[in-house]
Amino acid sequence: ALPALVNGITITVINIVGNSAMAGAIGAGGLGDLAIRYGLYRRDPGKLLVAVVIIIIIVQVVQLVGRLIENSLRRDVPMVSL
């Protein structure tokens, strides 16, 4: 049951990151706000790209760490399996 809980927590954290990025479009702050305000409104594609890449990196790191923890808690999956 513990690997399933870790998987659920991983999915929840990824959803929170995605929702907070989307919340920037309505002025809630965060990386989404940075991408909208400086990248889109001021027509600076460099800052827009940097914000998007940072969000993608955060999601990928959370997903990798969650998968590693989940695999380490399972008895039937080898540790090096990605």
Image (cartoon, rainbow, N blue to C red):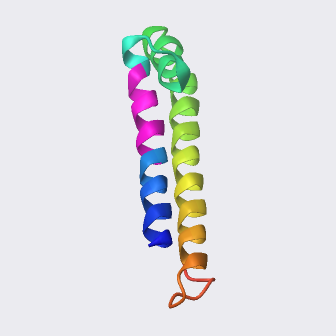
The residue located at (46%, 63%) in the rendering is 5
User: What is the span of residues highlighted in magenta in the rendered image?
Assistant: 14-23
Q: Which residue is at 57% across, 23% downward?
A: 47
Q: Is residue 1 magenta?
A: no
Task: Using the image, determine if residue 48 lies above or below residue 82.
Answer: above
Q: Is residue 66 above or below residue 50?
A: below
Picture coordinates of residue 59, whole percent (x, y): 52, 48
Which is nearer the eye, 81 or 49?
Answer: 81
Above/below status of 15 relative to 73: above
Q: Quadrant of the N terminus?
A: bottom left
Query: Which quadrant is the C terminus positioned in?
Result: bottom right
To which quarter of the image does residue 25 belong?
top left
* Residue 20 found in image quarter: top left
Quadrant assignment, res 18: top left
Q: In this rendered view, identify the residue nearer to me: 69 or 57.
A: 69
Image position, residue 42 (x, y; %): 49, 8
Frontmost residue, 44 versus 22: 22
Q: How many marks?
A: 0
- Comparing 77 with 36, the one in front is 77
Chief SS of the magenta region: helix
At a point 52% along the width and 58% down the height, the residue shown is 63
Percent x, y of residue 73: 57, 77
Give the residue displayed 55% in from the left and 62% down from the top: 66
Q: Using residue 65 as the reference point, say whether residue 6 is left or right of it.
A: left
Vertical arrangement, residue 1 with respect to residue 40, above or below? below
- Left or right: 54 with respect to 11? right
